[in-house]
Amino acid sequence: MKKIDRRTKYTLDVIKSTTLKLMEKKEASKITVTELCKIADINRATFYKYYVDIYDLIEKIELELYNSIKKSIETIEDEESIKPFINNIINIIYENQDACKVLFGPYGNKEFIKKIVYLAYVKSATEWKRKLEKYSTDQIDYIFNFFAFGSIGIIENWIGNNFLEKPSEISDLIVTLCDNLLNN
Amino acid sequence: MKKIDRRTKYTLDVIKSTTLKLMEKKEASKITVTELCKIADINRATFYKYYVDIYDLIEKIELELYNSIKKSIETIEDEESIKPFINNIINIIYENQDACKVLFGPYGNKEFIKKIVYLAYVKSATEWKRKLEKYSTDQIDYIFNFFAFGSIGIIENWIGNNFLEKPSEISDLIVTLCDNLLNN
DNA sequence: CACAATAATCAACAAAGTGTTGACTAACTT
DNA sequence: AAGTTAGTCAACACTTTGTTGATTATTGTG
């Protein structure tokens, strides 16, 4: 029975939201713990109780989003098509605009985003392997990387456009481009 | 007639090579000016004579590579196919393994890499626009981003494989995937 | 409601890095 | 050989870091 103390919840929340706010304007490396705590109006000692440094903090914010996407994707059964998985990812990104604007933004960590796209890939690996059976494992790796990074490019552009298009338009586009890639 | 003083050339060279060496092991943000100068065996005051901070320095290293690629690409005449441009980029990356390993590596700045791929795109924009004429400008933008980031994915994977494949294999793969994208 | 537990605050600390200065020394160009 | 220029050196005030132990405020539970 682990009840989360309200004070702790407040502290963690205010640290997180202040960090996201700061990351809209500057790189992670330019954010100091002192500055963050001053804006969040918490004591520096409190920060160090929960996090090692700014990077540790950002990693944990990323992990939170990653886990929520992962959890949501795992409820979908494995399928031939990558479509439902991409759909799911795009929707969650749409629902978490605040965090995603920052995490996928120019100062965001691409490795973490790649991990997310990888989730969809693993789930529909059967389709990939079947359609690309004429290629070697190494080549499939290259093609997957093309697709993964390509999808990141679309998502980044979408976020840069301030989520102008509907989520379904974006996921349809990604799935179409993926099909083009696989059907040649 | 601006002759570069040999002392200056040495200083700039040793700063650059030491930075690349350090960036193989750690993020830019973890490199301190003090540390860099100690290893490079130059005085901190000398560093500050040329650079504002570590980021300014890395930006200038990136710019150097970017300009050499740009210069090289500009000698090629505009063509319908993107092939010669991609070819050129891949070759220059191959010839500058030391710098590229770092600049395209996990701690590298993807914005700068995108600018490089963009060079090839601009040069063969005619082909893109013709083949994608059924799409709106916004959609072409998305598709280009898919291609640009996808290419970065392949290049990153190639570098991660320690340049295992021949440059021509990589550029052929990129061009093929680009064709698949455009011909559907 | 009261009380024990726990969280956050505060002030102080040494240690390290920053950015700049002016006087010096060494190397380079012509 | 001489004047110019680059790099060195030591010192400076200033900021940030990470940690400490004592103190205060809030919370969950019996």
Image: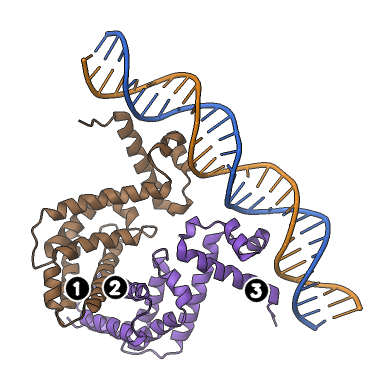
Chain colours: A brown, B purple, C blue, D orange
The amino acid on which the numbered mark 2 sits, given as a three-letter code, is Gly
Q: Which amino acid type corresponds to the residue marked 1 in the rendered image?
A: Leu
Position of residue B183 in the picture relative to residue C29 (left or right): left
Same chain check for tags 3 and 1 = no
Q: x%, y% of residue C7? A: 35, 29
Disc 2 to disc 1, C-alpha distance: 11 Å
Lower sequence index among marks 2 and 3:
3
| Residue identified by numbered label 1 | A177
Residue B79 percent location from the top left of the image? 35, 90
Q: Hey, which quadrant is residue A80 in on the image?
A: bottom left
Estimate the x, y position of residue B164 in percent, counting from the top left.
35, 80
Measure how far apart labels 2 and 3 are at the Cα level. Answer: 38 Å
Q: Residue at x 17, y 80 (%)?
A: B184
Q: Nearer the viewer, mark 2 or mark 1?
A: 2
Residue at numbered disc 3: B10
Q: Nearer the viewer, mark 3 or mark 1?
A: 3
Q: Which residue position is annotated with label 2?
A: B150
Secondary structure of the residue carrying tag 2 is helix
